[in-house]
Amino acid sequence: MPSTLATPFAPAEPMTLPAHVMACPQCGLHVTLPALRVGEEAFCPRCDEHLVSIPRSPVDAPLAFAWTSLILLLLACSFPLLAIDVQGNQTQISLLQNAEAIYRRDFALLANVLLLCVLLLPGLFLLTVIYLFSGIKTGRRLPGLRPLATLVGRIQPWMMVDVFLLGAIVSMIKMASLAQVGFGLSFWALLGFSLALTRTGSLIEPHWLHYRINLLHGTDPTQGQAEPSHGCHTCGFLSPASEERCRFCHATLHARHPRSLQKTAALLLAAVVLYVPANLYPIMLTESLGRITPSTIVQGIFVMWQNRSYPIALIIFVASVFIPIAKMIALALLCLAAAIPNQVHPLHLTRLYRVIDFIGRWSMVDVFVVIILVTLVHMGSLMSVHPGVAALSFCGMVLATMLSAMSFDVRLLWDVKQPGSTG
Ligand SMILES: [Zn+2]
Ligand SMILES: [Zn+2]
């Protein structure tokens, strides 16, 4: 295999990726890539999956955006997030007060999800990115680079700052008819944090990152590839089929994820079971002038519709009803398609998987709305909001569908015998 490398220890150069064979993570095809330079991008010829690109400024840009995100995260934790005024009763809340208020009401699952998905995991992600790219920039073989490069990819799907922001906006629009509402300094810091974090995430190219880290360790994964080999699902490089662990990122190697369909189906079943109480029981209880009104997800949507808050009704309907049901049906269909020979082209099924994998976490918006309203509106019998048990089962359902989608090995769709398939 040709290589453009002069020395395996070059700290900041080369900014190219030599020609080599890469395993597509979505269809398993071993794709022969040409040498790639900065700004170039490669796609799988069979399933259109983005394989790798080398961003412009591939080391400095992730570092700059990660530092910016980290500063904005600290600012977002330091000031009031939202404020309301009900008949002269003013309340301001910060991001951390949200979690504290939910803990005090014994809804620890919700508080943990908020802390993990909005603060801790994004913070860990950014610190890891800074550590990894500092190592690459200085050419120093820092300890733990390989497992940390794997970790950033694992954390990314669980970061939900953008979903929380949508939840904050929905909460404020919900409250606007009852009280004076305002966004604090932290809200704008959180908005900047969300944008900078998304940009940082988009600059992380796992295949290229593992290549650069291996160069620091004195190995070039683009050289000496031989068949028969297994493609690593984590770094995309090929290792001999006889080996249990990837040579380049140390992930466990499997031709296909073991028991992928069983795990997907079991988690899907858990999600279906949790979705029943999530709809039967109240997700939120509103106390106004001493009267407590429980409301389920669907009742909440009807009330918003009757109050002519059509965009909010639509957002909650899509996030809490349409996406979960569509995702559960799609996962069931994908499991069937991967297990039984069928006429559907795997490319269509792969695209369906990409859609449900992308939209799944947005279902969490209603959970964040409940958390924010519970923290923000606590004026005793004048007006208070309490969390309902359905918030727990709904949150559990979203987590179960996300885990179910992650357990599904998309490559199984391409293994099924299918008339007319090129694969
Ligand atoms: Zn592919
Ligand atoms: Zn690997």
Image: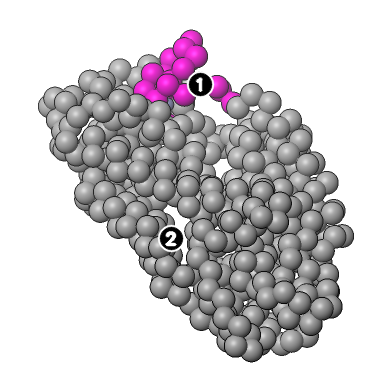
Q: Which mark is residue 252?
A: 1
Residue 4 x, y percent position in the rendering: 17, 30
Query: Residue at the location (27% across, 33% down)?
Result: 212
- Amino acid type assigned to the residue bearing label 1 in the image: Thr
Residue 5 x, y percent position in the rendering: 17, 28
Q: Quote the CA–CA distance across marks 2 and 1.
A: 38 Å
Considering only vertical position in the picture, is 390 above or below 187?
above
Q: Magenta stretch?
A: 236-256
Q: Quadrant of residue 364?
A: bottom right
Considering only vertical position in the picture, is 102 above or below 383?
above
Asked if residue 212 lies in the magenta stretch, the reply is no
Residue 395 x, y percent position in the rendering: 69, 52
Identify the residue under disc 2. Answer: 77
Task: Determine the residue located farthest toward the top in the rendered image.
Answer: 242
**Which secondary structure type mostly characterizes the magenta part of the structure?**
loop
Comparing labels 2 and 1, the label whose residue is closer to the camera: 2
